[in-house]
Amino acid sequence: MIKMMKRAIAIRNSTANDTGGNNKISLSPSDLETVTDKYATSSPPLTLMRVMGFFVISFMLFSVLFSLSVVLRDPPSDAAFREQPSSLFQLQQTQQGLDSDASHSGELLNDKLLGGLLADGFDEKSCLSRYQSAIFHKGLSGKPSSYLISRLKKYEARHKLCGPYTESYNKTVKQLGSGQFTESLDCKYVVWISFSGLGNRILTLASAFLYALLTDRVLLVDPGVDMTDLFCEPFPDASWFVPHDFPLNSQLNSFNQDSNQCHGKKLKTKSITNSTVPSFVYLHLAHDYDDHDKLFFCDEEQLFLQKVPWLIMKTDNYFVPSLFLMPSFEQELNDLFPKKENVFHFLGRYLFHPTNNVWGLVVRYYNAYLAKADERVGIQIRVFDTEPGPFQHVLDQILACTLKENILPDVNRGQNINSSLGTLKSKAVLMTSLSSGYFERVRDMYWEYPTMTGEVVGIYQPSHEGYQQTQKQFHNQKAWAEMYLLSLTNVLVTSSWSTFGYVAQGLGGLKPWILYKPENRTAPNPPCRRAMSMEPCFHAPPFYDCKAKRGTDTGELVPHVRHCEDMSWGLKLVDN
């Protein structure tokens, strides 16, 4: 640095000499030393400071970057949780999401199994409706009691132990050939005979199953001509259908009140003794049964029937209400069904699952015509008349009921179009009838005139068979599909006395509006009334007090068994 200063002075002197002699500067050696010392002790120039600062900062940055690279490459284990709180939070969120998904899956499974009512473990493809029905139904009306669910599981275990071709079944079948009961058996049975129309069959099969549940028996179902084409197997691991080689198959359709094995006839002829127990007894519980047959509903006769290994039952009645009047079953039924009006609703959803062929009819029609509507209305029409119809008084009654109760909107016959341009509420109306005439008239009314409310109403009818064809397979498949479709509606109107409507309301958990039965081809006034409960009506109940051994009004004995709305002598279950 000193050498640079001396050179600079020398250059300055040389420059001065070139400019003129009078400006010559002369420095002595001592002056030169003084100047040199001054510059040596003074601050460096500003440019030099910037250069030196740059180098210092660069060195510091390099040191920091090096340190960070070492730390991030191999961080200490305790620093990982301190330095990455967001990552930990994300992991927690992911776990919560998994837990939520698992919980949601559990809810879906619970819905699919109807709160534990249905058994899990079936091959889903073999019966799609069993678990898919939860998607279409709005859910069960009420919660099944834990006792009902546990009893159903016990029944399933018994059915598996005693079902067709099991060791116990084979042992018990051998008794049928002898005609007499000779030894104690682990399994006892009630065989349901396929009889009457489809609606009756569904209701009576539910009745027979409840009786089997109450008496610790196994229910076996006569397949008839089409039962296997209509219903899936309801119990896991064992069939509920009577085997083709069952010894009594050839006699099932011929049993009647005059059969020697008929319980009523045995009572009439006093041929029941304590010394011998028959291997089977025929129970005639159809609408034409007599007073002796009706003694089935007395506890005294149940003591005898408990000993018989095989009970063969023919009925076209939903006889559940009378089971609730029997003291021996009272406590068990109260535990099974705290809410009395849920009996068929729960048993129906447990037992009756449409086969894949029938389920295809249900799903296709529902998706095509009903799924997108804001509200679905079902109108089930059954006319008990010798002529096919349609009848004007029936149409008048349908419209009077649905308009008066605000089930359907009225139309504006003085206007051609509705002026409302906003989002319009839609109603899909599903009508079922053997005749197409009622559907056509109601459809045309809502096509030709706008509604007073601005609602859009679509009228649909899946089939019109003309007359009931009980023995035809596809006829019954369509009938079963239509019952199920009606059960998927939000509001239901049914016809008096019709088991078709009873099944729909019970499966759907609906309290319908019931159209009164017309008399003398005149529309009744009022046209309809709301049902007290969703339960079906027992059309031919006994009017007998078993304890007093005299006639009585069985619709007045207990609060939860009342006379039906549509049949004054019938009985139905209601809640207080």
Image (cartoon, grey):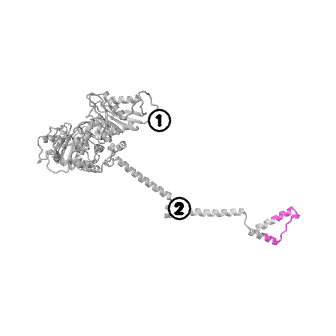
- Horizontally, residue 553 falls left or right of residue 434, namely left
Which residue is label 2 attached to?
73
Q: Can residue 439 be seen in the rendering of this structure?
A: yes
On the image, the x and y values in percent for residue 103 come to 39, 52
State which tag comes first along the sequence, 2 or 1: 2
- State how far apart marks 2 and 1 are (Cα): 64 Å
Residue 119, above or below 445? below
Residue 441, above or below 352? above
Q: Can residue 390 be seen in the rendering of this structure?
A: no
- Amino acid carrying mark 1 in the image: Gly
Magenta segment, which residues?
A: 11-35
On the image, the x and y values in percent for residue 250 come to 18, 39
Residue nearest the viewer, comparing 61 with 505: 505
Q: Which residue lies furthest to the bottom in this view?
A: 30
Secondary structure of the residue carrying numbered label 1: loop
- Horizontally, residue 419 falls left or right of residue 431, namely right
Res 527 quadrant in image: top left
